[in-house]
Amino acid sequence: MHSDQSYTGSLQTFRHGVHPESYKERSSASPIERMPFVEEYTMHLNQHLGAPSKPIVREGQRVRRGELIAEAGGFVSVALHAPVDGTVVAIDLFSHPNGQMQPAIKIRIDPYSTQRMEVPLPEIPVEQMDYQAFINGVQQAGIVGMGGAAFPAHVKFAIPEGKVCRYLMLNGCECEPFLTCDHRIMVEYADALIDGTRILQHFVQAEKIFIGIEANKPDAIAILREAAGSSGLPIEVAPLQVKYPQGAEKMMITAILGEEVPSGKLPLDVGTMVSNVGTIVAVADYFRRSKPLIERVLTVTGTAVQRAANLLVPIGTPMRQVVEYCGGITVPSPRILLGGPMMGMVQKNLDVPVVKGTSGILILTDKEVQSFDTYSCIRCGRCLDACPLFLNPAKMGLLAKNGLWDELEENNVLDCFECASCSFVCPSGIPLVQSFRVGKSMIREKKARENK
Ligand code: SF4
Ligand code: SF4
């Protein structure tokens, strides 16, 4: 990486990738609305990557909005807080968006609960903290990556010994079709975003801060340029080409710095820390307003929902009530996806709660996501041209189909981050990404058995 390397002003991007239809116009101009409170909230203990949180409340206990209800279960874990004033009515197994029954704390709301913060936490003099206290604070606040992966933010913010953060990158690409919550966050919460950036920059001391935004969000680019200009921080807003998966960390780094993160390495290995814009706003919410992560902005959209919207929703709200707030579903057999259509997770029904990683609820018609017939590979090479990591999906697909897990690993399937670009372009309808998911879990299981 060259020390003087920076964004040059033209629309930069990475190589390969695909251009799916954006479908963002249904919700991109809808201001964020606060979802009204409902009766019950289900707070799953594992709604982040890593160890589940450990409950510190008991059934029958009264809790206040913002009060700690479960503490971090290890370093790669975060705390969990009550999203409303209410009573703990159950600590039991409940349906999780991952398809399993998982432990959760159910809270019944007090009838007159307001959405005002009721737990006055002490002032947090963040600028006087040392780095470790800041990291602990982020973990205590329950903050995870809000782009969908839900990786504990404090782990990402902790710079390992011997590494430096020269570039801080805020990810506002939101390249997944349909989703618009990050777009609205940048437009409406620009001051909090800059404030959160100021807090993080105080600790990481990056030479340069980039805000990467796809060029299809000109209002966000203009607003953040203005806010950044008066911030006194070394921020450059970088409009990036509209291309999927531009918002993947490694792709954004390549687009902005012209530098590729090598296979098996992390952004900090090339001196860069990347964080989603929603995560940075959550940092400002906690350190400036004493508000832990108890609610998030998500997009409800799709052709089969009455009204598309960007909503500020308390974590734990039943998804069925979120969709009902948007007028409900308009077709008899809808297809539900959590997240966008490229990397989103298929959901059987809406009887699960919103978790910290829920960036969107996408409701489509059966016809839009009907499965197509699968044919043999015709060696057209389109998947090779689509893969942003220059993998060979056609070959990997064949190895996965034949259960050749060792060979699949040799072909770097573990680098695949399941962006689905290869599946998207395949004219034979081969479910490539699904076969890589299976292959990766078979390889990991095999490794775990060998390490026992
Ligand atoms: S899903 Fe994996 S193999 Fe397919 S394009 Fe994305 S990174 Fe490449
Ligand atoms: S895109 Fe599909 S048909 Fe074409 S080479 Fe790849 S796997 Fe084969």
Image (cartoon, rainbow, N blue to C red):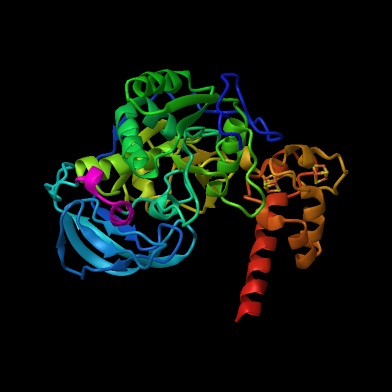
Report if residue 139 lies within the magenta region: yes
> Who is closer to the viewer here, 111 or 449?
449
Query: Can you tell which quarter of the image residue 389 is in?
Result: top right
> Who is closer to the viewer here, 228 or 276?
228
Q: Is residue 190 left or right of residue 258?
A: left
> Who is closer to the viewer here, 283 or 89?
283
The quadrant of the picture occupied by the N terminus is top right
Residue 26 percent across, percent down from the top left: 47, 26
Residue appearing at x 32%, y 30% in the figure: 189
Residue appearing at x 55%, y 50% in the figure: 346
Q: Is residue 166 left or right of residue 378?
A: left
Residue 258 percent across, percent down from the top left: 63, 33
Residue 91 visible in the displayed image: yes
Q: How many marks?
A: 0
Magenta stretch: helix, strand or loop mostly: helix
Residue appearing at x 13%, y 48% in the figure: 118
Residue 403 visible in the displayed image: no
Q: Is residue 405 left or right of residue 445?
A: right
Q: Is residue 143 left or right of residue 20?
A: left
What range is drawn magenta here? 125-141
The quadrant of the picture occupied by the C terminus is bottom right
Where ligand 2 lies, by image quadrant?
top right
Residue 127 percent across, percent down from the top left: 25, 43
> Who is closer to the viewer here, 3 or 380?
3
Report if residue 188 lies within the magenta region: no
